[in-house]
Image: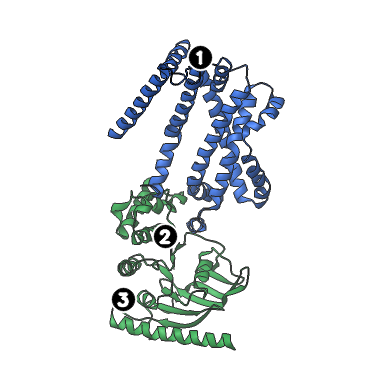
Amino acid sequence: MKRSLTTLLTFLVLLVIWQELVHYGIWSHVLVPAPLDVAKYFWDVLRDGSLLSATGVTLKRLLLGYFAGLVLALPLGLLTARFKFVHDTLGVLALGLQTLPSVCWAPLALLWFGQTESAMFFIVVMGSLWSVLLATDAGVRNVPLLYVRAAQTMGSRGFHTWFKVILPASLPFVVSGMKQGWAFAWRSLMAAEIYITILTGFGLGNLLHYGRELNAMDAVVGIMIVIVGIGLLTDKILFSPFERMLHRRWGTAK
Amino acid sequence: MNATPPTPASAPPKLTVENVSKRFQTERSQVHALDRVSLDVREGEFVCLVGPSGCGKSTLLNIIAGLDQPDIGRVTADGKPISGPGSDRMVMFQESALYPWLDVLGNVMFSLKLKPALTNAERREVARFHLKLVGLEKFEAMHVHELSGGMKQRVALARALAPNPRVLLMDEPFAALDALTREQLYGDIQRIRAERRKTIIFVTHNVREAVCLGDRVVLFSANPGRIREQFEIGLPRPRDINSVALAEHSTKITRALKSHLSSELAEVAE
């Protein structure tokens, strides 16, 4: 409680200093919008609903693409870990494509899918797919052989061993891969939204882009804050409980 | 030394190892882990396999467990050839091999979940019974990393006993524990064995431990792994590892082990 109060106060003081620096013209308000301008921007876009709808569009794209990426990546990662042939082919491809920032797929995605949600979806999937696949593969490879042998002596075979031993044993790897995949997907979606305009929906990236066009830095900073907020929230809601559970079970953190 | 065995000699062998050989190919060399090894184990017998590291005693245990296949020879349980691992022969490893994503009770229940005839309530009851047997009934909700090394091995023992196997295969299960914990476990294992009537094959390189636990001690030599000598241990149970009689036995066996070791070296030198 006391610590969060310290954090809150620190940022409050910084905000006041920032406001005064702009107010007295020490920082030009053309270059840096004042906190109060940003607050006013928030008030306006919250009233006309444009911020909420943009956030909705972006989150929908992100969640759809990310979970599709996960659903594809987990079984593919198990396959690369299980079969040498798949590892030597798909595994190598995954390693290569993981290094490619997935916004680089934008030109091809536009060509294949047109200016549609499908193009966005494709870019987000490409962002999350490979790192989750590689993490799953690494996780499975790092499962102690002893776990599997012990399971076999207890009568576990085939799918049972995969789902009850190998998959849970590789969870620490898989979850950190999921987190990395999330970060990649989020970054590539932002880049894609700034870069491409999809007529069926304006996301946060589009708003940021228009803020630049209109030289409305209050809008730009405001949207950046929203993007940071979403990142923090997803970490708290989506991953923190998972990681806490892992730490508790594996005893990996204090 | 050859006192009357604790089980009648007429009992048919529970496990039969016939002429088993096994080689491992490593990058640089070939290891002849087992060379024409034969061994009969009676129902309810406690057999300790002793030898220097690399003598193939663990390999033999893995073959009996069905985790490894022999190159030649065969192993039968109740006259039927062993084709793979099965919960009639449970294994305890040197490391507990408990699963960190399950709590203590969940670990003990793992093998019971594979028995479709049981209801969940029955599984829990069986698991709790075995946790009580190893003295850990109060720790069922703990996570694996919260347990000490000795407690982990007790849970592993409960897990191995839970599906009620007829044979228990133990691969140096106490090697990583401190002496005090180990002595407690010697007592526990003798008590549990007397209560639950198991056939046990126990691998160790600790002669004293073998004499303390075994009805019979089987001496192995390395490179190639062969059975050199067998000793029936007729000491009354429960045995105390610190007793003088036990020390006399283990001195004798240690001497035999050393003489085999030196003759091995002579063989290698030839």
Q: Which residue is mark 2?
A: B96
- Name the residue type under label 2: Ser
Residue B210 to residue A57: above or below: below
Q: Are marks 1 and 3 in contact (CB under 8 Å)?
A: no
| Local crowd size for mark 3, using a 10 Å CA cut-off: few (<14), some (14–19), many (≥20) | some
| Local crowd size for mark 2, using a 10 Å CA cut-off: few (<14), some (14–19), many (≥20) | many
Within the image, what quadrant is residue B23 found in?
bottom right
Q: Residue at x 62, y 23 (%)?
A: A117
Q: Are marks 2 and 1 in contact (CB under 8 Å)?
A: no
Secondary structure state at the residue bearing disc 2: loop
Residue A208 % position (x, y): 54, 20
Q: Residue at x 51, y 43 (%)?
A: A174
Chain of the residue under the numbered disc 3 shown in the image:
B
Residue A137 to residue A59: above or below: below
Q: Which residue is mark 1?
A: A50
Q: Which residue is mark 3?
A: B241
- Name the residue type under label 1: Ser
Secondary structure state at the residue bearing disc 1: helix
Residue B47 % position (x, y): 43, 74
